[in-house]
Image: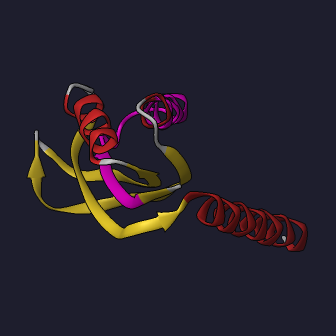
Amino acid sequence: MYLREYELVYIAKPELDDDTYHQVGDRLAEVVEEAGGFKLHLDLWGKKRLAYEIDDFSKGMYFILDFLGEPAVVTEAERFLRFNDHVLRYMTVKVHDRVDVDERRAEAERDEAEREAKRAAEEEAA
């Protein structure tokens, strides 16, 4: 089976607690999967200065979600973000047009295992 690969970047309000950030990310991943997509990776880029103020915020918490799906999955994910009060802005970009789902998911799992091993080694060294 072949699907498109997308990268969705969203900016959340900077004053939220960690639980709220996790709830938004987890719910977004659920929305993607309920719409027929596959979550590859959700990453926190951290708190960054915005290029311009948005709703009186000069900073925002940046997240990036990589996923596979059809255009309808993008529509559902963006609908969730549009109506979420914790999200300031979002943008979705198509990365690849035709991706083998099984192959890309296996690659994402290997990448995640490598990230976990690297994190564990860094924590052990500290």
- Image point (26%, 55%), residue name: 92
Outermost residue, right direction?
124
Compared to residue 105, the image places residue 89 above or below, namely: above
Q: Where residue 84 sits: x, y (%)? A: 27, 27
Outermost residue, front direction?
1
Quadrant housing residue 14: top left
Q: Is residue 106 left or right of residue 61?
A: right
| Viewer-proximal residue among 57 and 101 | 101
- Image point (29%, 64%), residue name: 94
| Viewer-proximal residue among 28 and 34 | 34
Tally the marks: 0
Quadrant housing residue 95: bottom left
| Viewer-proximal residue among 124 and 7 | 7
Q: Is residue 100 left or right of residue 78?
A: right
- Residue 120, magenta (yes or no): no
Judging from the image, the colouring scheme is secondary structure
Q: Is residue 117 left or right of residue 73?
A: right
| Viewer-proximal residue among 100 and 5 | 100
Q: Where residue 85 sits: x, y (%)? A: 24, 26
Compared to residue 17, the image places residue 67 above or below, namely: below
Q: Where residue 57 sits: x, y (%)? A: 18, 45
- Residue 29, magenta (yes or no): yes
Compared to residue 118, the image places residue 66 above or below, namely: above
In magenta, the rendered stretch is 4-30
Q: Where residue 62 sits: x, y (%)? A: 37, 55
- Image point (50%, 30%), residue name: 30
Quadrant housing residue 120: bottom right
